Amino acid sequence: MRKKIFNMIWVMGVLALAGFCLSACDNELDIQTAYPFKLETMPIPGRITKGQTVEIRCMLVRQGRFADTRYSIRYFQYDGAGVLRMDDGTVFKPNDRYALKREVFRLYYTSATTDAQKLTVTVESSDGQAQELELSFNNDTKKDESGGQGTSSKEDERHFGGRR
């Protein structure tokens, strides 16, 4: 009799444990679909003249991969005037979104003024994350002593992590 009670308690314990474990499960798979990303650039000049084109080498650095994640790019120029285009020839219109199909790409900015120029390039993912790149160019009316096109400012170093 004692053995029968012990077996019954043991069976009830096993059933309770199984019920507890199985109740924690659901039919939904937990798949992470949103991964953070950064937009990195190579150093760019801080000075530009009217008609000059500056190359901006960009790379998306993704923390993880989800096959259905899509990226788009847009820009807004809030000071000065110029044209921004992609390495495939696409000329951007301010605040229009364009599909970004590659993780490594180049942008080309051509100045259309002798004034200082500031613009923001925004890369957005389909899950709502965004990275902004602030670009600032000063007018380069004279060459520096080395014959180059000027140097970048401290503000540019702050925007691009001080990488030169």
Image: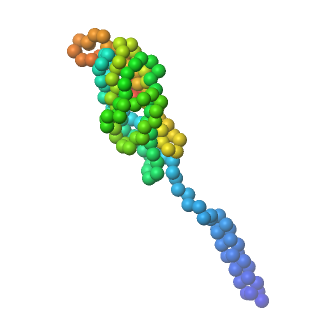
Front position in the image: 140 or 92: 92
Q: Quadrant of the N terminus?
A: bottom right
* Image x and y of residue 93, in percent: 42, 29
Left or right, 141 with respect to 126, comes to left
Q: Nearer the viewer, residue 29 or 71?
A: 71
Mark yes or no: residue 154 visible. Answer: no
Tell me if residue 150 comes above or below residue 26 in the rendering.
above
In-front residue for pair 40/92: 92
In-front residue for pair 32/77: 77
Q: Residue furthest right?
A: 1
Outermost residue toward the top? 142
In the rendered image, residue 104, in percent from the top left (x then y), is placed at 34, 40
- The quadrant of the image that shows the C terminus is top left
**Image point (33%, 29%), residue name:** 108
Which of the 4 image quarters holds residue 74?
Answer: top left
Q: Is residue 4 above or below residue 26?
A: below
Q: Quadrant of residue 49?
A: top left
Whether residue 53 sits left or right of residue 29 in the image: it is left
Residue at left 46%, top 33%? 96
